[in-house]
Amino acid sequence: MADLRGALLVGGTSSDAGKSLLVAGLCRSLARRGISVAPFKAQNMSNNSAVTLDGGEIGRAQALQAAACGLEPVTRFNPVLLKPGSDRRSQVVVRGRAVGDVGAGDYQQWRRRLAEVVHEELASLRADYDVVLAEGAGSIAEINLRRTDLANLGLARRAGIPVLVVADIDRGGALAGLYGTTAVLEPADQALVAGYVINKFRGDPAILAPGLEMLRERTGRDTLGVIPMHPQVWIDAEDSLASPVGRRVGGPPAPYRGERLTVAAIRLPRVSNSTDVEALACEAGVDVTWVDDPGAVHAADLVVLPGTRATVDDLRWLRERGLAQALVERAAGGLPILGICGGFQMLSRQIDDHVESSAGAVDGLGLLDVHIVFAQEKTLRHFTGDDGRHPVHGYEIHHGRVAACREQTWLNEHRTGPEGARRGAVYGTHGHGLLESDDFRRAFLTEVAAAAGRPGFTPAPDLSVAAVRQGQLDLLADLVDTHLDMSAVQRLLADGPPALPSVLSWLSWNPST
């Protein structure tokens, strides 16, 4: 495969169809074959992001895909990132740097500039790597957005690359979704659709086979793989649909003989970097669930108030839902609370925000005597520090900064000094990913268990979150190798889009033919 060179776009019939994890699995599968491969997502819309080696930020899924390739994350893997702050406006991050806010109505003004950025970066990656695996965005059949599309068939058509379309069969309607997605495309776009992938299949493949054959007869396209549902695939889920209220985070509970810890992660409307709680869910004996009600806040052993792209607005939501009062009562009772980034800012005494919400001075929850001031320039950096006993590593992405702190410092960042704050069992930090530092996480959970009255809980002495993530990537590659026609994938990479027929549009399709 030394001479294999090409690119492939994995699109979907919907958001959360499995594009991100399929690309990660393909990246690891090809990398294990000794092929030089890089991930690419032209335009991502997500509040889950990671700091890159070159000091910018990209979607967290692309950071995971880079790890699958054996690469450090860099901004060229995701040159345009949109971070929603409301239903109508998003922060625009270009080549890792925030350059302004955009609404749906004025996006047209940005498109030409962003299109050139996207195609320049894709061309540079194709020159540097044998294979580039691109991930589409949402559904490829958003025909109302086709004229301004940067990430799906607009990208594939200009670059001349084939497209695989993946559907989540667990939601139902996958065959209709694949047919309809293809049918509504204009003929030149249809010609790039080279095949289909069924994701999250449960049951007997023989029962599905006649449907796939009928799909082939109607579209002229083969289904290149049926990926089964696997309960162990869960870490680094990027899409907000992957963290609904009531969902338990993690795979099936591992055997555990001690006393269990319950963690309530508050599902904020504009939650960001929701993957922070996944390190806790890796621990046997720790049950993490997304919640949005005061009762769950009162009942949990630990409450995590995660990051958000709208600190002031989500703080207002906390108060409206009765969650703010529940947090105040928890703190008064000495029960543990962890605030991360925007969640840390909400725990403060006062927030001055003339940047994100333009709300000015706003009272925080007052659980930490900290004054937060929002700065125009975003802080983007890797976090390297300690808690006085254990090394801590992570990253920071935030506009809010600590202007004054009259609490005990919780952590120390080796380059910038004291970071975060602590009052009793209330902890706050701007650092993301810190709980992936294994010794630090174990010490923190031991403190939490003592404060929550769970002396029978003991964290595992040898769990490595980094090893869990690598295991997940290998599992994804194993699923791809076993259930996807990799020979067909490699032919697409080598030869480009095959000559395929157009599909009748849904307006003219006659089911009797």
Image (cartoon, rainbow, N blue to C red):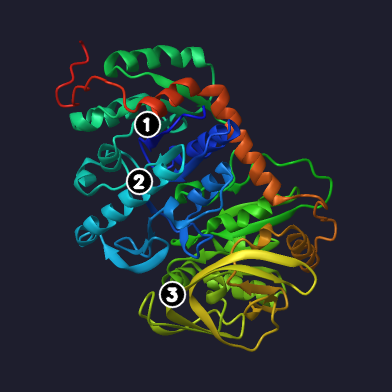
Task: Please determine whether, in this image, residue 360 is positioned above or below residue 274.
Answer: below
Q: Residue at horizontal 80%, vertical 63%? A: 446
Residue 473: image location, x then y, percent: 60, 39
Q: CA distance from mark 2 to mark 3?
A: 40 Å
> In what element is the residue under mark 3?
helix
Q: Is residue 375 in sight in this rendering?
A: yes
Q: Which mark is residue 123?
A: 2
- Label 3 is placed on what type of residue? Val
User: Going 46% across and 72% down the picture, which residue do you hit?
Assistant: 311
Question: At label 2, which amino acid type do we have?
Answer: Ala
Q: Residues within 10 Å of mark 2 (few under 14, many from 20)?
A: few
Q: Reading the chain from its start, which is encountered first: label 1 or label 3? A: 1
Judging from the image, what secondary structure is the residue with disc 2 in?
Answer: helix
Apparent side of residue 140 relative to residue 434 in the rendered image (left or right): left
Pick the residue in front: 76 or 437.
Answer: 76
State the SS at label 1: strand
**Residue 312 image label:** 3
Quick one: label 1 or label 2, which is nearer the N terminus? 2
Tag 3: Cα neighbours inside 10 Å, few (<14), some, or many (≥20)? many
Proximity of marks 1 and 3: CB atoms separated by less than 8 Å: no
Q: Tell me the mark number nearer the camera, choosing from 2 and 3.
A: 2
Q: Is residue 512 left or right of residue 412?
A: left
Instruction: Tell me the CA gap for discs 1 and 2.
Output: 22 Å
Quadrant for the C terminus in the image: top left
Q: Residue at x 22, y 40 (%)?
A: 143
The x, y position of residue 477, in whole percent, is: 58, 32
Does the image show residue 230?
no
Residue 159 lies, with reference to residue 372, above or below; the image says above
Look at discs 1 and 3 and give the one toward the viewer. Answer: 1
Nearer the observer, 428 or 76: 76
- Identify residue for label 1: 165
Q: CA distance from mark 1 to mark 3?
A: 39 Å
